[in-house]
Image: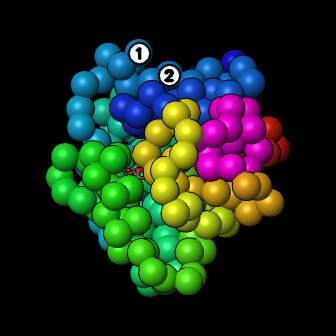
Amino acid sequence: MQKLIFATNNRHKTEEIRSVLKGRFNIITLAEAGIDIDIPEPFDTLEENAKEKAITIYKLTGISCFGEDTGLETHALNGEPGVKSARYAGEERDFTANMEKLLNKLRGKADRTARFRTVISLILEGIEYQFEGICEGQIAEAPRGEKGFGYDPVFVPLRSNRTFAEMSMAEKNQYSHRGKAVERFVQFLIKI
Ligand code: IMP
C-alpha cells in the first residue's frame, strides 16, 4: 500500500482524512515519522501554505507526502478570517477566542453566509499537485455541539440545520471541505 506522510500535527485532521480514505493509503503522521517540528504557515494564500507544509516535510524525508491548509471565509467580512483562521484572535491559536471574535464581528449582520475552503498539496516523487474542497454554509448565532474542532461549533453546512460539532465525523465528512478535497486527491492517486 502506498505510504504518504501527512504534514500536520493536528490529530483531528488526521482522523478525518483516515476516515475518508478507509484504509486505501498508508498515512503516516509526523509523530509516527519521528518528526517534531512546528510546520510554517508564512504565506497569504492557502495554496502557498499547503505547498510549504508539504515541501518542508518532503525535503526532510524524501518520502511522498501531503500538506493541507484550511480557511473559513465569511461573506459579510470580506472573506475574514480566511488564511488567518488559526490565529484570528491571536498567536495562541485559541479555538474559543477565535469563535468569539467571529461571532462579535458578525453580530447584527443579516448575511451570515460562509464557506470552508481546504487546499491539499501533494508531493509525489518531487512533483506537486493540488486539490481543493469547498463547503458552503452559515455561521450560527452561538456555538452548538461538542464534537470536532476549530470553528465546528459555529458552522452549519448548506442543507443541514446542525453545526459540524453536532455531527459524527462520518457525517461531517460527507459535507466537508476536507472530505471533498481528499476525495479528489484519492481519485487522482487511483488513476495514476
Ligand atoms: P489550519 O489549516 O490548521 O491553518 O487551520 C486554520 C483554522 O481553521 C484553525 O483554527 C483550525 O482549527 C480551523 N479549521 C480547520 N479545519 C477546520 C474544520 O474542519 N472545522 C473547523 N475548523 C477548522
The three-letter code of the residue at mark 2 reads Ile
Vertical comparison of 178 with 83: above or below:
above
Extreme left residue here?
91
Vertical comparison of 63 with 98: above or below:
above
Residue 35, percent from left and from top: 29, 23
- Marks 1 and 2 in Cβ contact (< 8 Å): yes
- Magenta residues (range): 162-177
Considering depth in this image, is 93 or 30 the residue closer to the camera? Answer: 93
Vertical comparison of 192 with 111: above or below:
above
Q: Secondary structure at mark 2?
A: strand
Residue 78, percent from left and from top: 44, 84
The quadrant the C terminus occupies is top right
The three-letter code of the residue at mark 1 reads Glu
Q: Secondary structure at mark 1?
A: loop
- Rendered image: mark on residue 87: none
Considering depth in this image, is 87 or 57 the residue closer to the camera? Answer: 87
Magenta segment: does it hold 139? no
Q: Quick check: can you spot residue 17? A: no
Vertical comparison of 141 with 7: above or below:
below
Residue 2, percent from left and from top: 65, 24
What residue is shown with label 1? 32
Residue 82, percent from left and from top: 42, 68
- Rendered image: mark on residue 28: 2
